[in-house]
Image: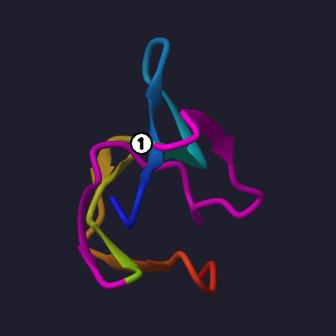
Amino acid sequence: AVGNKIYLFGGMYQYNKRTNSIRVYDTVAKTIETLSVTLSSQYAYLATGVVGTKIYLFAGQEGSGYYKRIHIFDKIHLW
């Protein structure tokens, strides 16, 4: 979470379908928003960490393989 917002990156739905969407849950307004920016690929099983306004996304799975990458999402600058 950054401030009063929880970010959801990618994920899996139905049976083995992945998404590259980024959703934001505002804990004060109790609303969910889908951002216009997306992940570069359709990831599932990401790990995240937060420092300031930056959210670090680690690894993740796309298809049958796992990534060894780190992406940085800055809620101020949106990538």
The image quarter in which residue 50 lies: bottom left
Is 13 rendered above or below residue 45? above
The amino acid type found where label 1 is placed reads Gly
The image quarter in which residue 57 lies: bottom left
Question: Which scheme is used to colour this image of the protein?
Answer: rainbow
Q: Quadrant of the C terminus?
A: bottom right
Q: Quadrant of the N terminus?
A: bottom left
Residue at the image position 37 percent from the left and 43 percent from the top: 44
For this view, does 71 lie left or right of residue 68?
right
Residue at the image position 56 percent from the left and 58 percent from the top: 41
Q: Residue furthest top?
A: 14
3 or 32, nearer to the observer: 3
For this view, does 29 lie left or right of residue 35?
left
- Residue carrying label 1: 63
Residue at the image position 39 percent from the left and 65 percent from the top: 3
29 or 47, nearer to the observer: 29
* Image location of residue 9, percent across then percent down: 46, 51
- Magenta run includes residue 7: no
Residue at the image position 63 percent from the left and 78 percent from the top: 78
* Image location of residue 8, percent across then percent down: 44, 47
* Image location of residue 51, percent across then percent down: 26, 83
Q: Residue furthest right?
A: 36
Is 5 rendered above or below residue 40? above
Is 22 rendered above or below residue 68? above
- Magenta run includes residue 36: yes
**How many dots with numbers?**
1
Element marked by disc 1: loop
Provide the major secondary structure of the magenta segment. Answer: loop
The boundaries of the magenta stretch are 28-52
* Image location of residue 62, percent across then percent down: 41, 49
